Image (tube, grey):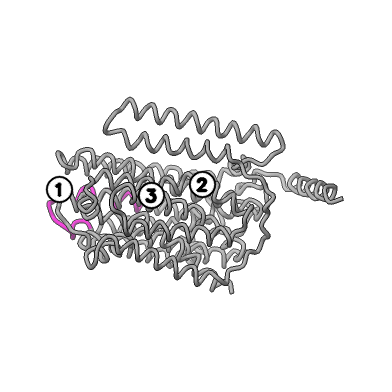
């Protein structure tokens, strides 16, 4: 039963990651068909990733209120409708509505249940590591294979057919997911923090939106980023005030009480920033500057797909043999080498695809090494009661990294892609190299021996920062309060 349930969950993660990268090879086709620009396509891609990041935390919270399976199904339907809207889009506006909004909202609803259900289905160390390994592998493969599959479909039929393909995959997931069961009952009377949801979403949107405007108006960029920071400060103040009043906020501050989980989420953010940033930068450079079509661009990205798939498939064995910190450190180091290879080889030679393949493969290997251990570190730092919240927060942090990668590196290359393409490409890759180096430094702060085992007790931190006795007392108090309410 558990292994059968893992198939639709992993496939759902695949298609959502696929959607984040497959449009990269359609830049020319979409811009010509919809009479828009490269910046317009970048806007749609970035907004899709941003909507996911902004709503992933509320999505994780809603799983407790409406149930994990129900929210998973609702997310699939919303995503499917968005994919069909993109397939018939007459202009950029409808494309943004279908891809950025509907597919983004659908993904934010369905992804938290994927990780929560996997955590609840697989409770022992070995099986959970294997489950996370498969789901994480499908995330990486979806992101890396998106350009290849999207390029094949675009070249053979049209870019619109790529969205029909997504809708068909959603239908398959719905059919396979009918047998899923929810191990925990829904709590429809549980209150939902609307104010916190609005503040967190607005704050993230303002920051990423400001980055997108960096090449146009510097003063407006700074104003939006500053406003975003202020709104996020207000969000955390709201969280503290709500908790102090004995109410349930959108995000519990207990989620930030684990040093290991915090560091793990930073590594997640940076690895997806590098992966999605590289995907957009290389795809834009090949199509706009070198004149590659969709299928040629997609085939080049096969190297990254092979690298991610190869290392992800042996993630379970690697986790048993090496500490998770070592795997994440090695992954970032290898990724830095890959980014530098892409930068140097393309800068020093005017070669085509062969010059790009080694760098993309090396990046794929590096990302594949660290996807599974970073996810396992974060999810396993908390018990079942906090799985909804930590899943939403973890996925939000990862997708924020994806949107930042496309926004920051994408903005750098788009700003000069027609005037100084090689220089803009080099600057964008340097930004990604710095991000990978930052990830390496963060990984070095993880504990030397961090097991890939099961979850810590609720309220406990992964680095032993909580008092087990205090946790037991709190649980007894909660039980007593519940008995009083019932009587």
Is residue 482 found left or right of 260 in the rendered image?
A: right
The dot on residue 97 is 3
Helix, strand or loop for the magenta stretch, by majority: helix
Is residue 180 found left or right of 89 in the rendered image?
A: right
Residue linked to disc 2: 446
Where disc 1 sits, the SS reads helix
The image shows residue 332 at horizontal and vertical percentages of 39, 50
Which of pointers 1 and 2 lies earlier in the amino acid sequence?
Answer: 1
Instruction: Inspect the magenta stretch and tell me whether residue 351 lies in it.
Output: yes
Which of pointers 1 and 3 lies earlier in the amino acid sequence?
Answer: 3
Crowding at dot 1, Cα within 10 Å, few <14 / some 14-19 / many 20+, comes out as few
Where disc 3 sits, the SS reads helix
> Which range of residues does the magenta coloring cover?
334-356
For image coordinates 18% across by 56% down, the residue present is 355
For image coordinates 51% across by 46% down, the residue present is 446
Is residue 433 found left or right of 170 in the rendered image?
A: left
Residue linked to disc 1: 348
């Amino acid at each position: 039963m558990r292994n059968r349930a893992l198939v639709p969950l992993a496939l759902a993660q695949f298609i959502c990651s696929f959607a984040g990268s497959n449009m990269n090879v359609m830049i020319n086709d979409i811009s010509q068909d919809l009479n828009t620009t490269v910046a317009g396509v970048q806007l749609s891609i970035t907004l899709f990733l941003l909507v996911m990041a902004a709503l992933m935390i509320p999505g994780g919270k809603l799983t407790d209120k409406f149930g994990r399976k129900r929210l998973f199904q609702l997310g699939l339907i919303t995503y499917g409708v968005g994919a069909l809207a993109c397939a018939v889009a007459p202009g950029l506006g409808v494309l943004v509505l279908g891809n950025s909004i509907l597919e983004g909202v659908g993904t934010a609803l369905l992804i938290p249940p994927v990780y929560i259900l996997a955590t609840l289905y697989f409770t022992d160390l070995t099986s959970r590591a294997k489950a996370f390994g498969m789901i994480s592998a499908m995330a990486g493969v979806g992101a890396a294979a998106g350009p290849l599959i999207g390029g094949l479909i675009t070249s053979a039929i049209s870019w619109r057919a790529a969205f029909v393909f997504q809708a068909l995959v959603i239908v398959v997931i719905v059919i396979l997911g009918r047998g899923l069961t929810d191990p925990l009952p829904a709590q429809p009377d549980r209150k939902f923090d609307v104010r916190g949801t609005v503040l967190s979403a607005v704050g993230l949107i303002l920051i990423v939106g400001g980055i997108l405007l960096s090449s146009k108006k510097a003063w407006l960029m700074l104003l939006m980023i500053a406003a975003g920071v202020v709104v996020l400060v207000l969000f955390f103040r709201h969280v503290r005030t709500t908790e102090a009043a004995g109410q349930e906020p959108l995000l519990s501050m207990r989620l930030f009480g684990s040093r290991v989980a915090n560091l793990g989420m930073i590594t997640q953010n940076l690895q997806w920033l590098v992966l999605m940033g590289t995907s957009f930068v290389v795809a834009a450079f090949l199509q706009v500057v070198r004149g590659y079509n969709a299928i040629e661009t997609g085939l080049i990205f096969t190297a990254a797909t092979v690298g991610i798939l190869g290392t992800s498939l042996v993630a379970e064995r690697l986790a048993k043999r090496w500490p998770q910190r070592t795997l994440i450190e090695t992954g970032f180091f290898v990724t830095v080498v890959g980014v530098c290879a892409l930068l140097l080889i393309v800068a020093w030679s005017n070669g085509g695809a062969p010059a790009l393949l080694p760098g993309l493969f090396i990046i794929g290997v590096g990302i594949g090494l660290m996807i599974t251990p970073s996810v396992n570190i974060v999810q396993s730092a908390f018990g079942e009661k906090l799985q909804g919240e930590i899943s939403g927060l973890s996925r939000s942090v990862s997708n924020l990294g994806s949107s930042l990668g496309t926004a920051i590196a994408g903005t750098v290359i788009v700003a000069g892609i027609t005037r100084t393409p090689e220089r803009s490409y080099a600057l964008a890759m340097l930004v990604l190299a710095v991000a990978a180096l930052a990830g390496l430094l963060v990984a070095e702060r993880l504990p030397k021996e961090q097991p890939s085992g099961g979850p810590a007790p609720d309220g406990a931190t992964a680095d032993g920062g909580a008092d087990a006795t205090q946790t037991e007392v709190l649980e007894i108090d909660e039980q007593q309060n519940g008995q009083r309410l019932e009587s």
